[in-house]
Amino acid sequence: MKAPILTPLAASLPSTVPFTGPETQERRQGHHFIARLGANESIFGPSPAAIQAMQSAAGQAWMYGDPELHDLKTALAQHHGCQPENIVVGEGIDGLLGYLARLMVQPGTPVVTSLGAYPTFNFHVAGYGGTLHRAPYKGDHEDPQALLDLARQTGARLLYLANPDNPMGSHHPGQAIQDLVAQLPPETLLVLDEAYIDLAPDGTAPEIPADTPNLIRFRTFSKAHGLAGLRVGYAITSAPLATAFDKVRNHFGVGRIAQAGALAALADQAYLAEVRGKVATARNRLAGIAKTNGLIPLPSATNFITMDCTRDGDYARRVLQHLTAQGIFVRMPGVAPLDRCIRVSLGDEPSLAAFETALPHALKAAL
Amino acid sequence: MKAPILTPLAASLPSTVPFTGPETQERRQGHHFIARLGANESIFGPSPAAIQAMQSAAGQAWMYGDPELHDLKTALAQHHGCQPENIVVGEGIDGLLGYLARLMVQPGTPVVTSLGAYPTFNFHVAGYGGTLHRAPYKGDHEDPQALLDLARQTGARLLYLANPDNPMGSHHPGQAIQDLVAQLPPETLLVLDEAYIDLAPDGTAPEIPADTPNLIRFRTFSKAHGLAGLRVGYAITSAPLATAFDKVRNHFGVGRIAQAGALAALADQAYLAEVRGKVATARNRLAGIAKTNGLIPLPSATNFITMDCTRDGDYARRVLQHLTAQGIFVRMPGVAPLDRCIRVSLGDEPSLAAFETALPHALKAAL
């Protein structure tokens, strides 16, 4: 009797968590956060119609969800002007990124992303043995030209770009994405993470047909729709690639309540518009708090504001620690020079007021 | 611009669905089933406390679930008399089987299961390129000795056994599992699928410490707990193997409503006892219907009864087709000689009455 034998690849991987949850921090520090502003969740909550749909579905949870997700895929296709065959639904964008990596990455496969971009994408690529190549940000933006050059140099199979970007909150106009797709090397698929697109200015989403073979776009109900805890993301891509997910996905992985909630949220576009309005207001309020305290709020096309603390990463990390100690959950970019910033999710007025109270103390303590 | 390039392994896989959902069948036939008795769901539903917990959590679904699943793991560990470090929670047993295959299976890895056992396990093993070796059932039981012999012959890294068994509903006493574990080759991990264990006779669960390194046990909230549509399964295993899942799992994959519902269901053991009573009653009722119609109900330690139609597979398939045509959703084993049977989930009285009405017509039409 000995320990189970992992594959060499699995054995080489760390037992890591891409993000430490706020609950873990709360357990360590022994008290709850008073403001949960670190995970870019939508504190404005989901649509009341979605809440009602989930509550109604709760009593039906003895039934598996439709493994083909017919109704949700049909509604998403209608919403996006494509066919259901162009849609893949999965356990959040995270889950779908994992399936994509499984389909296209094997040991040594070159993959391109930005230095400091979404860690969970890197987690999945590394998890299948891929080789990550990282292009630096250009200022506060991911740099399409640098990413393209790097993809050409490395023969990348995947090129990851988030538009709008996390953790900086910046965005490119849709035309820049269209130009990027047009110039991709023939072996490269653009992995376009549009998690925050519902909160971005008009024109941020590129106008590219769903059946474009070298593009896969990821969307989610976790951000503007306020359903991070429901775990429903989806991809829009060419039908052959969408179908390929059936090779590997957890076919019953998106359950009955999740499908019902997502369907109702999608249908309630009026609520989404309301959230956009609240987000715009909260952005101004939060940017004002930053400015009042001498920080530079970066322009945001998302539900968070990244604030330049105007010193180095050590300073920003101390600011974050002193915010955390006061019960404010925030995060920050992981690498220089982005790590001169802290990243603060938009919140309701009580959350923002708590941040407003805590920030000057944190800045003073961090000096 | 060309089609995305899949890995050779991914390209070799079919875009298959291990099980066609009843919704797909309903769409094809253009009407709803009147009795949903094919997926071994618990028509008795989840605990009212679980429903309430899910409904309360719906409004909180804007928050990600705790990626460490602290509260649920702690409660499960207490329930099972082990440590939280021995528990892995995931997106159903299906999701966890996928992670296990990823950790331990690479192209050519030998894996042993029974001919006719759970297809989704095979889907995951094949999905990572493993080589499946199948031992036949011995009568209506999976055959531990034959599985053991095959594991020794092939050097299997995984040996899958479900106790109680699906699709036959049979079970082995816990002692047989203990004997099997004691005799495993040193390189073999027993994958013990205990999805139906809550409905089995006392003594079916082996008494083996959680830290046993060559055993992983899978449990679920999908069957007796009536939460198939919530997607929460878990594994009990040695701490090193449990920790290894962190290398590959979708860390935020079990959402907030799912965690709340599972926690409340686990706490309501009185309801579970009530379900056991209803299951016992429904088993008798359903066995009686089988007998009245000249079928042989196999003894069941589960929430379904597998009925020997006493002829060959073609006949049983026709019976199933004629049940389906009458609006009765049932399934059947996929391979001979098990496919002389149909598999009927337990139901409430309306469902069983609908089956009772339809069965004699189906048997007659199938002749």
Image (cartoon, coloured by chain):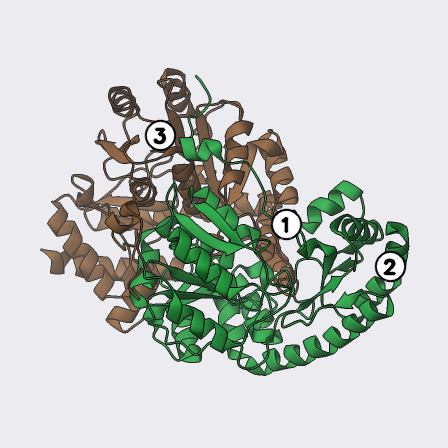
Chain colours: A brown, B green
* Callout 1 crowding tier (Cα within 10 Å): few <14, some 14–19, many ≥20: many
Q: Quadrant of residue A86?
A: top right
The residue carrying mark 3 is: A158
Residue nearest the observer in this picture, B196 or A225: B196
Earlier-in-chain disc, 1 versus 3:
1
The residue carrying mark 2 is: B358
Please provide percent x and percent y for residue B92.
51, 59
Residue B121 appears left or right of A365:
right
Indicate the amino acid at tag 1: Asp
Q: Is residue A273 above or below residue B65?
A: above
Indicate the amino acid at tag 2: Ala
- Same chain shared by disc 2 and disc 1: no
Q: How many marks?
A: 3
Q: Is residue B26 above or below residue A151?
A: below
Q: CA distance from mark 1 to mark 3?
A: 30 Å
Q: Considering the image in quadrants, where does the N terminus of chain A appear? A: bottom left
Residue A171 visible within the image: no
Q: Is residue A318 above or below residue B24?
A: below
Q: Residue at x 52, y 52 (%)?
A: B134
Please provide percent x and percent y for residue B90.
44, 59
